[in-house]
Image (cartoon, rainbow, N blue to C red):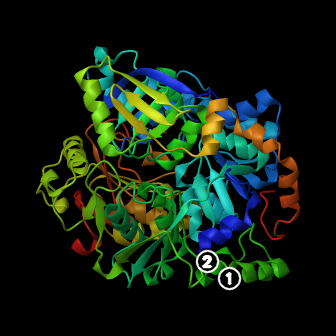
Amino acid sequence: MDAFTTHTGRAVPLRRSNVDTDQIIPAVWLKQVSRTGFEKGLFAAWREDPSFVLNDPAYEGASILVSGPDFGTGSSREHAVWALQQYGFRAVIASRFGDIFRNNSTKMGLLPVVLPEDVVKSLQDAVEADPKTEITVDLVERQVRAGDLVAPFEIDDYTRWRLLEGLDDIGLTLRHADAVEEYENGRQPWLPTTV
Amino acid sequence: MGRTLAEKVWEQHVVRRAEGEPDLLYIDLHLIHEVTSPQAFDGLRMAGRPVRRPELTIATEDHNVPTVLGPIADPVSRAQVETLRKNAAEFGVRLHPMGDAGQGVVHIIGPQFGLTQPGMTIVCGDSHTSTHGAFGAIAFGIGTSEVEHVLATQTLPAYRPKTMAIEVKGELPVGVTAKDLILAIIAKIGTGGGQGHIVEYRGEAVRNLSMEGRMTVCNMSIEAGARAGLIAPDETTFEYLRGRPHAPSGEAWDQAVEYWKTLRTDDDAVFDKVVEIDAAALTPFVTWGTNPGQGAPLGADVPSPEQFADPVERAAAERALEYMGLTAGTPLRDVQVDTVFVGSCTNGRIEDLRAAAEILRGRSVVTRTLIVPGSMGVKKAAEEEGLHEVFTAAGAEWREAGCSMCLGMNPDTLKPGERSASTSNRNFEGRQGKGGRTHLVSPQVAAATAVTGRLTAPADL
């Protein structure tokens, strides 16, 4: 996983709510068996509209997505996270996220930042007024900064530590292999197996 | 203080708990399909790790499979299915490939085999894993990184979600189904209403549902944003499970039932959130928009964006009406559809097909109508009852098992601008094919709609 400490970059305002993962990466892109090449599928249907915000050259090179509420709802497809990262996004800011998307993001090092809706709107306004506006997402200080705006955000200590260090869960869990084995010895005898 | 059902099941599966860390949760059953697993198996290979418990893992081919006989025409889809076959063989995982009698949609076959049982933890790289909560299991969708984690360790680190009760008061009126109930619940609490929670569906109307109906309700928990949804097991659950291939038998059955009976929320337990629904007030329900929360009774009109006080909801409604090609004030019963789809992990079980057949018996469809059984087992059962003859006599297409038009990864799709009445779970833009327009409905409304070509309840026929 990519480590995330602090990131400063320009942002794209996405003024839509309920941006489901089918929009982030349509199902036709899920047929790939590799982990790469998903940037081309990012918002594929919406990008066909020349007026879609991602097609605006003013936002080229932006690395932070500032979205309306309920970003990443629906399908569990982690491909949505891969597509955002491979397109160049390092963080997504919204007032609410789909649970599975948020989980998937933190496994991959894409930072989901929850801020109150009015703060999200202020950021979108600022970026629309001047697309060169730089936003800093600081995981160390748990803060988003843009010009005069300083907004704290919450993230649990464990996930923050994992992201700062860029640690993989599997390696961490395997340290507790003994505990897993002990648990397995006490499982209820009637539980099914697939064989 | 008492505990909720979700808390009991969760606690039973905690392998390790440490201050300031997520619980390490043991996973009793891991379901696999071809779409979200290839990169996970690649990860195992790169790290030189085996699948820790292949005998707690089962795979099926469902998302890409065509529903007409023959090989997969699309080379990319075919490669994905072949990749699953290679991975299952290499890592020793049981697989039900296309054409196999046990093949089907991942959330249909778990319960069908009796692998889904009360009190278990079940995961799958698929958000509709919540379906299995109908048995009193904690079941939730995960991403590919977590699929790899479960393959490697049979555990997941996770914080216990909060608990939420949805109390369904009274009885569902005749003609109102589990699908109408869950669509009404999502419309009430919204697509984010359940975020961060495990929902327990409770009350008389829920108790009176069949297992198929309970699966329909739990299936769509994710559409309300919930991490999982569950229902306490009872005699209905036990009767459904008895005698299934992987259900316990003999003494183990008695032991299991004794434990399963303890899997209920204590009377003095407290939920973090409680929502009440009046079942008696419900009528057939359909969606008009592009998220599952944008729904209304079939007897209503297409809403006007001005009806929504919240500016975010208003903007979403405006955009949805434009995408859906609908005008505010149009009676939903006047909306014409091009295609009817009966199937999916939401409504592709035998009871759903019986309900559709009952309405189509002796009638003819006027739209393209796809009837897709959720599994080869469901297909066989339907054919033994002669349901396939009812469907074909009515002019509907009787297909092979798979996810099909629920998400259009196989050739069953809508063309741009086409409109469907669909028993599936998502009305997202382009979900059933680029530019396609989806109205989510029950199997009963789907069948009646196929007869008239407009959104219709059976009572209207």
Q: Is residue A48 visible?
A: no
Amino acid, disc 2: Pro
Counting other residues with Cα less than 10 Å from the Cα at mark 1, is it few (<14), some (14-19), or many (20 or more)? some
Q: Are marks 2 and 1 in contact (CB under 8 Å)?
A: yes
Residue B125 located left or right of residue B408: right
Q: In percent of the image, x 84 and y 81: which residue is there?
A: B251
Label total for image: 2
Q: Classify mark 1: helix, strand or loop.
A: loop
Residue closer to the observer: B352 or B30: B30
In the figure, is residue A8 to the left or right of B36? Answer: left
Give the CA distance from mark 2 to mark 1: 7 Å
In the image, what residue occupies the spot 27% across and 27% down? A126
Residue at horizontal 59%, vertical 36%?
A: B71
Question: Extreme left residue here?
Answer: B329
- Type of residue at label 1? Lys
Q: Establish if B256 lies above or below B35.
A: below
Quadrant the N terminus of chain B occupies: bottom right
**A136 shown above or below B115:** above
Horizontal and vertical percent for residue B293? 33, 56
- The circle drawn on residue B233 is 2
Left or right relative to A136: residue B400: right
Q: Position of residue B426 (x, y in %)?
A: 40, 51
Q: Which residue carries the number 1 mark?
A: B261
Q: Is disc 2 placed on a helix, strand or loop?
A: loop
Instruction: Determine whether A159 is above or below B453 in the image.
Output: above
The chain holding disc 1 is B
Of residue B247 and residue A63, the one placed in the foreground of this image is A63
Please provide percent x and percent y for residue B429: 33, 41
What is the quadrant of the C terminus of chain B in the image?
bottom left
